[in-house]
Amino acid sequence: MLGRPVSYVMFTNSHSMSQSSFDARRYMKLFLYWPEAVHPKLKHALLICFGVGNTAKALTDTKSLDSIDVVDISRDVLTMNRVIYPNKADSPLSDSRVRVHIEDGRYFLQTTAERFDLITGEPPPPQAAGVVNLYTREYFQLMYNRLSEGGMVTYWLPLNLLTDVSTKAILHAFCDVFKDCSLWNGMGRSLMMVGTRHARGPVSEQHFIKQWQDPVVAAEMKRLGFERPEQLGALFIGDADYLKGIYTDTPPLTDNYPKLIEAPFTSKQEAQRLFLSFTNVAAAQTRFQQSPLIKDLWPERLRETSLPYFRQQNILNAYLYGATSYPLHGLEGVYRLLTHSSLSTPVLWPLGSDSDIQRIVDEVGDAQLAEPLMQLHLGIRLLSERKYAEAANTLARAERMPQLREQAFGLHIFALCMAGQTDQAQRLAQEQYPQILREKGFAAASLNDSSLPPPWVWMKKMFGIDPFTNTSDTQGSAHAPFKVPLKND
């Protein structure tokens, strides 16, 4: 963007293996944020598969760790670390606590005498040559054997790369080893499996929230949308009892039967049933309240205060699992986040922005900041900060770019409504939106309510904004000043 890299992608053999984008960082760093919250004393950590260093960076940002072992089979992968971290002082591999092992992950687990409080990893895609051996029951047993008592494993489950059969086979293999296994939302279809070696708790509330009090860690967590400790609980999908009901009809993935990783879908209906089960947030909230694992690990007060955040997670799931190329389609969810929570970063995502883009907005000079694309993303940020009038003015400047006009104009109208300026919003909508539709090829005679995309239909219902009605026809009726409800965390 404007000649600056937004993020990096690592390709090996022409295949994307890892990246440094905010969505990848979100779930990869969760592999550390989750156990750090609930483990009473993480001291020794093992990371298998370095990638671009997202999880490694989360580990080295955590001051309480005494040692961090990093295992990767490729020296070249580790060497590329300097592309992501050109300043050597920022590189996780420069941390004095890090010990690097150029080694096969399974062989390392078989030969090391060390025990670890945390073992984590995100291997290459499961169907890549040889990678299935990092998803079998025997491999998970090796991880369990190298855990200290109370130790934890966090591991990647990529739904988008698996069928319903291979998903169940991996979960079965994992839960055969970790009797207290659980499944958590990460980012979209990248989920996180968690297992422990007899972990017991709960930790104190002060311990659980300490990451949000560390200025370095908290700043990155905010960039990734983890703004409050209560959000962590709302990532819950289910524990061992739930997962057993999911995989009971599928054998576990083992070394002797590796082709289960390539098993075809049972049927379109069964795949959809599994997907809907994972994304049913209301059911997950009930399971969270009833889960023995959560009672064991979560501080009591946080078990209760986490419950409202399942509503926010439901909004995020609607976007993260069904992202659209037309950002305004998420407008209703954005409204609910703005009016019923204090969250800001997740507001960016359905509107087509994120913390990586916002970093560039902060870095550019005044001349580049004045460009329409930067004004669009600045306006989206101002919306997330609830500075609605200022956002409206900024978004109006983004409309100068034809490619951005429809999106910027829709957000401009939305910002005016959120600022309580519905009369002005109606006047602009009636004056300009029909012209935008004509520019897209709609004949003037066909312009009516049926031409409205869903976001505009919602704005008509919510705020009374009707682009095909004259302002004078509606004064004093549908367009009374709109008042933003008080947030309710």
Image (cartoon, rainbow, N blue to C red):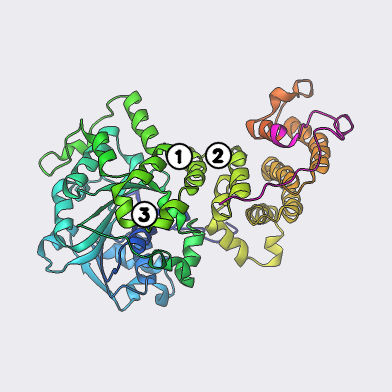
Q: Is residue 26 visible?
A: no
Inspect the image, locate mark 1, and give the three-letter code of the amino acid beneath it: Tyr
Magenta stretch: give its range.
460-489
- Residue 169 position within the rendered picture, expressed as x and y whole percent measured from the top left: 21, 38
Disc 1: which residue: 321
Ranked by sequence position, the earlier of labels 3 and 2 is: 3
State how far apart marks 3 and 2 are (Cα).
23 Å
Q: Against 265, is 140 above or below?
A: below
Q: From this viewpoint, which residue is outermost toward the front? A: 300
State how far apart marks 1 and 3 are (Cα).
20 Å
Nearer to us of marks 1 and 3 is 1
Tag 1 and tag 2, C-beta contact below 8 Å = no
Q: Which type of secondary structure does the marked residue at label 1 adopt?
A: loop
Nearer to us of marks 1 and 2 is 1
Inspect the image, locate mark 2, and give the three-letter code of the amino acid beneath it: Ser
Q: Nearer the viewer, residue 237 or 391?
A: 237
Q: Image point 17% across, 45% down: which residue?
A: 176
Disc 2: which residue: 325
- Residue 214 position within the rendered picture, expressed as x and y whole percent measured from the top left: 46, 71
Q: Which type of secondary structure does the marked residue at label 3 adopt?
A: strand
Q: Image point 31% across, 79% down: which residue?
A: 96
Disc 3: which residue: 18
Q: Nearer the viewer, residue 187 or 370?
A: 187
Q: Main secondary structure of the magenta part?
A: loop
Residue 484 bears which disc, if any? none
Q: Is residue 291 visible?
A: yes
Instruction: Categorize mark 1 by other alpha carbons within 10 Å: few (<14), some (14-19), many (20+).
Output: some
- Residue 454 position within the rendered picture, expressed as x and y whole percent measured from the top left: 63, 31
Instruction: Categorize mark 2 by other alpha carbons within 10 Å: few (<14), some (14-19), many (20+).
Output: few
Residue 465 lies in the magenta-colored region: yes
